[in-house]
Image (spheres, helix red, strand yellow):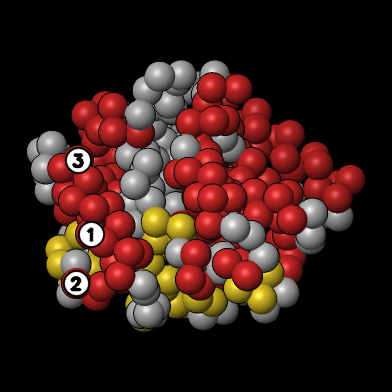
Amino acid sequence: MRKKITVVGAGNVGATCAQELARRDYADVVLVDIIPNFPQGKALDLNQAGAVLGYEPAMTGTNGYDETADSDVVVITAGRPRSPGMSRDDLVTTNEAIVSSVTREVVRHSPKTVIVVVSNPLDAMCHVAKAVSRFPKKRVVGMAGILDTARFAAFISQELDVSVRDVTAMVLGGHGDQMVPVVSATTVGGIPVAELLSKARIRKLVERTRFGGGEIVNLLGTSAWYAPGAAAAQMVDSICLDQKRVLPCTAYLEGEYGIDGLYMGVPAKLGASGVEDIVRLKLTAEERKMLRASAAAVRDVVGVLKRS
């Protein structure tokens, strides 16, 4: 039986995620947006692409939520994107209202679903979705770590002129400028990256990763969408297909890594029920310090929320 996936927000990130999922061909996908005719047009286009790419046309576009009923997974990408000079944190007030509204509709139509949050500021919006939905923590998870890790891995592969498929990286913490690329857990073909690059070069790659989203905003005038959409689709795969992959995700911590009552990026096992386990990495003293600083930054943003 085919799965059912809803993507809320038919903009760049949402449409890219929907396209990636359609190409997998294991699920019916519903694309939701408030703009009249917009998701319907995107769905029609994506269905026609199936005739070229070889997947079944199973995309529905809608301005409401009736068509989303009983979704296995709902991906929330709705919200205002960043513009040049704007931090993710600047979006908190506007996107809190949007994510709250979307979450209420999601719960009403799909009370057993797993929610994957993509809207920024990501960590804070996970708190909003969890508070409004009243779902258990395992059924509300954020997409951030896969994206941040992909950027770190891409920069390393470019620096060393090696295949990105041979780079294993990990980025923890909040989805912001104080994220924590875990150098101690990063390897290239099984070789620790610290043996291949100097500390100075690694520091530059770490800094570029932290500001990787801003770099794209400055170039495009808006947020990235190809990598975020693909990253969200990877999480949906692991949940819908019960793959139990260990992926860097934004999960609710209750003591893990010494952090309590906060959504943070950590390695998590994703399966049919959502976040099934949180994997504990052995961090260096410096990495633990950076993770605490990242947690403090996330708490500051969460503290601004009406629902924290």
Identified at 64% across, 49% down, the residue is 155
Compared with 98, 206 (above or below) is: below
Nearer the observer: mark 1 or 3; the answer is 1
Nearer the observer: mark 3 or 2; the answer is 2
How far apart are the alpha carbons under marks 1 and 2? 8 Å
Residue indicated by mark 2: 258
Identified at 22% across, 29% down, the residue is 93
Task: Identify the amino acid type marked 2.
Answer: Gly
Which element type, helix, strand or loop, lies under badge 3? helix
Residue indicated by mark 3: 301
Q: Nearer the N terminus, badge 1 or badge 3?
A: 1
Task: Identify the amino acid type marked 1.
Answer: Arg
Task: Identify the amino acid type marked 3.
Answer: Val
Which element type, helix, strand or loop, lies under badge 1? helix
Identified at 67% across, 65% down, the residue is 196
Residue indicated by mark 1: 292
Q: Nearer the N terminus, badge 3 or badge 2?
A: 2
Identified at 44% across, 27% down, the residue is 81
| Residue 77 rendering spot, x and y as whole percentages | 45, 41
Crowdedness near tag 1: few (<14), some (14–19) or many (≥20) residues, C-alpha within 10 Å: some
Which element type, helix, strand or loop, lies under badge 2? helix
